[in-house]
Image (spheres, rainbow, N blue to C red):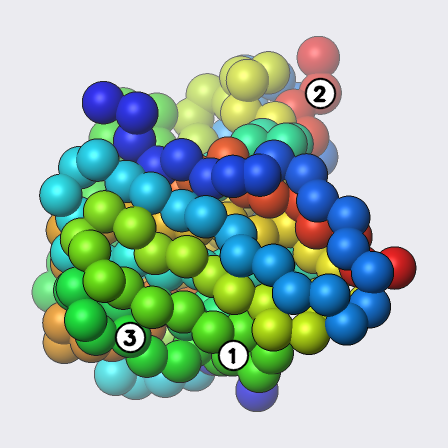
Amino acid sequence: DQQVKQNSPSLSVQEGRISILNCDYTNSMFDYFLWYKKYPAEGPTFLISISSIKDKNEDGRFTVFLNKSAKHLSLHIVPSQPGDSAVYFCAASGMNRDDKIIFGKGTRLHILP
Amino acid sequence: NAGVTQTPKFQVLKTGQSMTLQCAQDMNHEYMSWYRQDPGMGLRLIHYSVGAGITDQGEVPNGYNVSRSTTEDFPLRLLSAAPSQTSVYFCASSYTGQANEQFFGPGTRLTVL
């Protein structure tokens, strides 16, 4: 039973346009949500996070939106750049110290020239 | 700081052999975890630890053992390797189990014949 779902395995976006990556979750106990970026043959790197008490968090070109009622979050990248081509993982966790962090299956983003 | 280091980078085992994947971090992080990444499956949590002397199971713990005798080290042991354990293994660490970003190692690519 997938608790964190990324339903789009891949996404292609023109350079300079907006990239929108989506993530859905089923566990209403999740309180923190994170996005990681992964290049081939490297470990994932943290990108941006959001707490369930917020509905938006922005960091430069990256913005994460959280809709708790829909159990949905999205990552917006504006403008998209060639270096953004990577696999993006959505992750979620509860607020307790012992809570596990659960990852989605990832979305591969291709930025087209 | 070296961050999170993993050894070896590559390993080939025969079915039934045992081995230990090493993971170390020099950031004094309490939380450490092991993930495996398989095609189309994303990152799945194997075991995690919220501090020295404390470990717990993740989503896919069968066939793996861990221990956490020091804050810095979190080795993953395969007791009797099986072809189903062919995967890329990532170790990660963070200050706490949630909210804070996890730092990932570069990964170990394991093939079991």
Residue in front for this viewpoint, A56 or B48: B48
From this viewpoint, is residue A67 visible? no
Same subunit: marks 2 and 1: no
Report if residue B108 is visible in the image. Answer: yes
Residue holding disc 1: B61
**Residue occupying the point 30% across, 50% down:** B73
Q: Position of residue B50 (x, y in %)?
A: 20, 67
Q: What is the C-alpha distance between the residues marked 2 and 3? A: 44 Å
Q: Secondary structure at mark 2?
A: strand
Identify the chain of the residue marked 3, using the numbered disc in the image. Answer: B
Residue on which the image places disc 3: B55
Q: Does dot 1 land on a helix, a strand or a loop?
A: loop
Does residue B42 appear to the left or right of B47 in the view shown?
right
Residue A52 image point, x, y percent = 18, 66
Q: CA distance from mark 3 to mark 1?
A: 11 Å
Quarter of the picture holding the C terminus of chain A:
top right
Question: In the image, B67: left or right of B22?
Answer: left
Where residue A112 is drawn, which disc sits there? 2
Q: Secondary structure at mark 3?
A: strand
> What's the amino acid at mark 3?
Thr
From what the image shows, is residue A76 above or below residue A24? above
Q: Nearer the viewer, residue A5 or B82?
A: B82
Which quadrant, please, contains the N terminus of chain A? bottom right
Chain ID of residue with mark 2: A
Residue type, numbered disc 1: Pro
Left or right of B3, for residue A20: right
The residue that appears at 60% across and 73% down in the rendered structure is B79
Amino acid type at circle 2 is Leu
